Image (tube, rainbow, N blue to C red):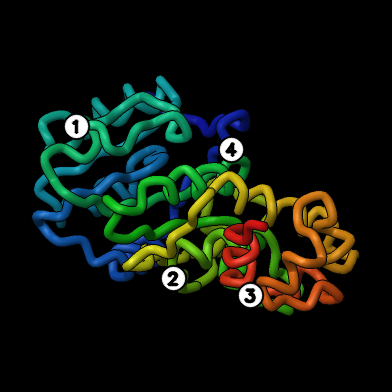
Amino acid sequence: MSRISPRKRFGQHFLADPVVLESIIRAFSPQRDDRVLEIGPGTGVLTELLLDHLDYLVTIEIDRDMVNHLNQRFSGSPLSVLQQDIINTNIRSPDVIGESSSIRIIGNLPYNISTPLLFHVFDNLDIVQDMLFMVQKEVALRLVAQAGDRNYGRLSVMASLHVDTELLFDVQPESFSPPPKVTSSMIHMHPKHPANNHGNRERLEMLVKTAFSNRRKTLRNALSSMITPEQFKKAGIDYSLRPENLEPLDYLRLSEIRD
């Protein structure tokens, strides 16, 4: 089998530390009849461990050479390898979810697409049981940040409205080949049930994005193009505060205010 080299344009860093791999499996605790989707399997080191615990596994890989490598390495195994861009993948399709009513998702998310990928998964949480992801530590800290924290921002708000996120452990650069320039973190996400009623999702996202694009301003000034002083009062929110002072549910309430 030919040697596979990581490609910079796909943001590939192959996890090679057996201790970390075993820690991931323990944290995920796959069960035989779980329907699991692995994102970005790389050379298949985690894939192999998952297959030890599962009756069936679906992986999504964008790199054609990697797909060929995986099909050769796991020929005859209960593995389905889909050559797709996960951002454009319909995880509700029969190729992914099959006949199951829910799916578990695991993967080492490429740093350059981790945020849009998370938002893509958030759109499908009604069929997601849980998610175990490796992300850049900076992203992980933003995901678990609370109002008033230095790392609190748009991603913190939107994630909190959709999922409960637990920061599990860090993974150092030397655990990868080639080593990235940053530390990674494992996070475990569970959809909130019942999910918050987000009403007009586009308005909510625009509201949060606008607020944190002007985070040094007061809310009145940061959101002057979207929320009037009267609407702030109607929502019971002090518009002299700054964007990082509002809880996620405050943003949800603001997005639902109408004259």
Q: Please name whichever residue, 188 or 170, is drawn nearer the observer in this view of the structure.
A: 188
Which residue is tagged 1?
94
- How far apart marks 2 and 3 lie (CA) works out to 15 Å
Dot 2 and dot 1 residues touching (CB under 8 Å): no
Q: CA distance from mark 4 to mark 1?
A: 28 Å
Distance between mark 3 and mark 4 Cα atoms: 33 Å
Q: CA–CA distance between discs 2 and 4?
A: 27 Å
Select label 2 or label 3 by which is in front.
Answer: 3
Q: Which residue is mark 3?
A: 247
Residue at image position (36%, 46%) is: 124
Indicate which disc residue 11 carries: 4
Circle 4 SS class? loop
> What residue type is disc 2 on?
Asp
Disc 1 and disc 3 in contact, CB within 8 angstroms? no
From the image, tell me which residue sits under label 2: 164
Q: Position of residue 178 (x, y in %)?
A: 58, 44
**Amino acid on which the number 1 mark rests in the picture:** Pro
Corner quadrant of residue 63 = top left
Is 235 positioned to the left or the right of 150 in the image? Answer: left
Mark 3, Cα crowd under 10 Å, few <14 / some 14-19 / many 20+, is some
Q: Does label 2 or label 4 sit earlier along the sequence?
A: 4
Q: Secondary structure at mark 3?
A: loop
